[in-house]
Image (cartoon, rainbow, N blue to C red):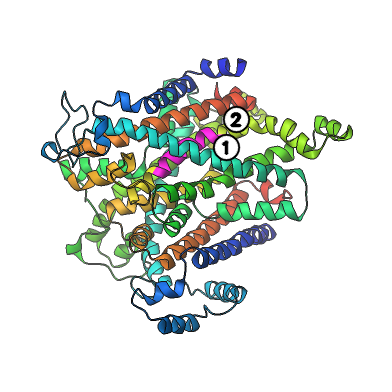
Amino acid sequence: MSALRQLLRDPVAALGLAIVLFAILVAAFAPFLAPFPEDAFESHILQRLQPPSAEFWFGTDNLGRDLFSRVILGTRSAIFVAVAVVLSAILIGVPIGLAAGWKDGWVSEALMRVTDIFLAVPQLILALALGQLVAPGLGAAMVALTLTYWPFFARTVFAETRRLRGSLFVDALAGIGAHPVRILLLHVLPNAAPAVLVRATIGMGFTILTAAILGFLGVGAAPPEPDWGLAVAEARQHLPEAWWFATFPGLAIMLLVLGFNLLGDGLRDAADPRLRRSRR
Amino acid sequence: MLLYILRRIALALPALFGLIVLTFVLSRVVPGDPAGTLAGDAATPAQIADIRARYGLDRPLLEQALVHVHQVVSGDLGNSLFSGRPVSEEIMQRLPATLELTFVALVFATAIGVSLGLVAALDHNGPIDHVVRIVSVGGLAIASFWLAIMLQLQFSMQWDILPLRGRLDVALGMPHRVTGFLLVDTLLAGRLDMFGDALRHMVLPAITLALPGLATITRFTRSGVLEALQKDYVLYARAAGYGRFRLAAIYVLRNAVTVTVTQIGLLFGALISGAVAIEAVFDWPGLGTYAVQAILSADYKALLAVTLVVGVVYAIVNVLVDVAQALIDPRIAQQPR
């Protein structure tokens, strides 16, 4: 609890947490908050491309759908994609990092070399290649994002495990005969958790951005899905007249990513006392 | 130092080799039957068998893998399924456009980022520091393709003061190709009007691409300077009567900037990724638009080749960055790794 209080004392981190909580609430109650929830799939061609008004706060899109509703509904898929990708990446990366960090030898070498290969290409490029080859679509994009993000967790946990395995309490546990799996899961992992949490928070923002780029390039979500990146891509053909169509989905991306980044920044400060000193 | 450089290159090689293997696996496993893809929908079984024999697809997988590695190492990336031309040729034609854009963005991001970081650190917890901190976190949150479109909307469509797309006004023609970098080639051709036009085309894409990098460089410079400011030698220099900015320029920046240089290497990956979407928005004829085109035409040969080339460029940049870092701080080359 003291860690949470520490976090909330940093106004920047508190703002990040507030934005993230707000977005989660919006995502959870999206169908009730959106004025026109049916606009996820229905189109009303007669009221297309109307500027923002009292009825349509963010205006309407090229098929006459309420943009405000679609931005709200899009929160859901943005957060869902980010959570699913980051969780899967943790499930792959953390065990690999633990295993590779615990012992020296060829297994450890091999695991970290494979990690290096995935890190040898910028994430988006690899995700594009993987996503396209598997089959374009949101599912493939999520698989591709997971396959390109787990190495970051493997690296983080590897470094933490290496650091911790030489410490006295690990020696003591090994001395009284604790099984390595028990030591890793119950003692090393909890100590590595803050680093993983920071990585995961920043990874959420990063994944939302990358998923938006994939959607924008046409390899992520498919129409008529209310996806932010996709909406910006659709809006390009209607510029400069329908400025609202491109503007609001992009602002939504920015706000949500900003929230995760601020929160991640604050968590990092709270987790690393050395940084805490220099930041204040 | 030479030994350090060689060791650094040796460290990069296994990952690149692994990347070649990975692209091979992807090209064989994922698209189903490559011979069927190559032959097209209307092919007879005999034609498919013919293609299979011609491209060596009937050989054992291990042999195919070795052939693939040999081809890639000797620069043969196969032919595009879309245009039929050698992929390596098409990529070499487009690579300079992306490298030029990335390089300009990187210089811009470094110049502004280091200055902002330094100023913020010297004004620690002051108003400038807070503004810079917000900007540097915010800059990382903006989707590059969206910012690109917003800038286009404002500067090209509404105010009409900067070009909307492309590298050069079509009416001006193209300069004789020497390096492929338009900012260099136009000067070599002695065409200042073309140089100016190329520069104007560069402004919006470069700013868009630079923003996330600028944010990162600012953050790392700021924390690097803050850390260096607490060192004893700074205390001594201060006691000896050095002024604030002279102190920062001579003692602090060089020590703080090694961290920033590492980041520049890592950033290069982010820049290349960002370039894909930004090039698509600005119709920039580089590797990014090539990749997008390859996606749209399901040209997996081209897509995998782009992945490989980007991996190689990325590895080269990171070796260069480590060397640059060792030149700035000679202690690094002496540490056993």
Cα–Cα gap, marks 1 and 2: 8 Å
Would residue A201 be counted in the magenta stretch?
yes
Q: B91 above or below A74? A: below
Task: Kindly indicate whether the residue at mark 2 contacts the one at mark 1 (C-beta within 8 angstroms).
Answer: yes
Asked whether residue B233 appears in the rendered view, the answer is yes
Precedes in sequence: disc 1 or disc 2? 2
Label 2, residues with CA under 10 Å away: few <14, some 14-19, many ≥20: some
Q: Position of residue B4 (x, y in %)?
A: 68, 57
**A80 relative position to A268: left or right:** left
Residue A131's label in the rendered image is none
Quarter the N terminus of chain B occupies: bottom right
Magenta stretch prevailing secondary structure: helix
In the rendered image, which residue does mark 2 sit on? B227
Q: What amino acid is at disc 2?
A: Glu
Q: Nearer the viewer, residue A206 or A74?
A: A74
* Residue at 24% across, 35% down: A39
Quarter of the image for residue A230 reads top left
Pointer 1 chain: B
Q: Residue at x 57, y 37 (%)?
A: B256
Subunit of mark 2?
Answer: B
Q: Amino acid at mark 1?
A: Ala
Q: Is residue B271 visible?
A: no
Q: Which residues are magenta?
A: A199-211
Q: Position of residue B95 (x, y in %)?
A: 40, 63
Residue B93 spot, x, y in % from top left: 37, 68
